[in-house]
Image: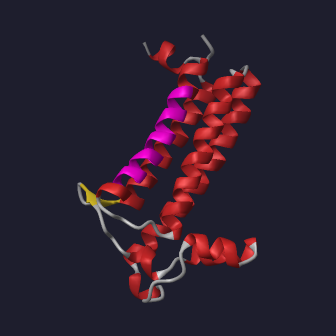
Amino acid sequence: MCNKLFAGRRGYFLGFVASFGLVGLALFLQQKYNLEPCPLCISQRIAFMALGILFLLAALHNPGRVGRKVYGLLHVIAAATGIGIAARHIWIQANPDKVMAECGAGFDYIMETFPLKKALDLIFKGTGECSAIDWTLFGLTIPQLSLIAFVGLGLFAVLLAFHKKA
């Protein structure tokens, strides 16, 4: 069963569905609970989409042994980026007094107004709105759940990279 599930295209397609399913879940929660995503939330969504696109490309390509390792490395880089963003977000939520107290500019405003390097600096510094905890599941915040998902998807990518093709 595991061989068929993780073999070639199926495994990569499963990673694609999981990645974009998480983005869909974030959009659902945003609409259902009227949540306004902060810049770090949006950055995490972008990281999930990047992972999903890489999984989709791998599914379409159906790589051989070396290609699986290359895709695995790319997946791990994307997952590690997401882990870093989520970890920063968790830190900001745990230390709201160390982040500016007032709400900062939104993601769209930052990206449209500032050069890319400055915009990325502002996004990753976090804003007051990044420290807000608006929704939890089993006591875990959305960034904590995202961190778990990034770790899981990264490990899944490593599994796919070293799994023998059926």
Whether residue 73 appears in magenta in the rendering, the answer is no
Segment tinted magenta in the rendering: 13-29
Looking at the rendering, which quadrant does residue 111 occupy? bottom right
Residue in the image at 63% along x and 49% along y: 78
- Residue 41 left/right relative to 140: right
Residue in the image at 73% along x and 34% along y: 70
Residue in the image at 50% along x and 80% along y: 127
Residue 156 image position (x, y, % from top left): 52, 34
Instruction: Please name the predominant secondary structure of the magenta segment in the image.
Output: helix
- Residue 142 left/right relative to 86: left
> Which of 60 and 139 lies nearest the eye of the viewer?
60
> Which of 36 and 149 lies nearest the eye of the viewer?
36
Residue 122 visible in rendering: yes
Q: Is residue 18 above or below residue 93?
A: above
Whether residue 16 appears in magenta in the rendering, the answer is yes
Residue 76 image position (x, y, % from top left): 62, 44
Residue 18 image position (x, y, % from top left): 47, 37
Residue 120 visible in rendering: no
Q: How is the image coloured?
A: secondary structure
- Residue 85 left/right relative to 74: left
Looking at the rendering, which quadrant does residue 102 occupy? bottom left
Residue 134 image position (x, y, % from top left): 31, 68
Residue in the image at 40% along x and 88% along y: 97
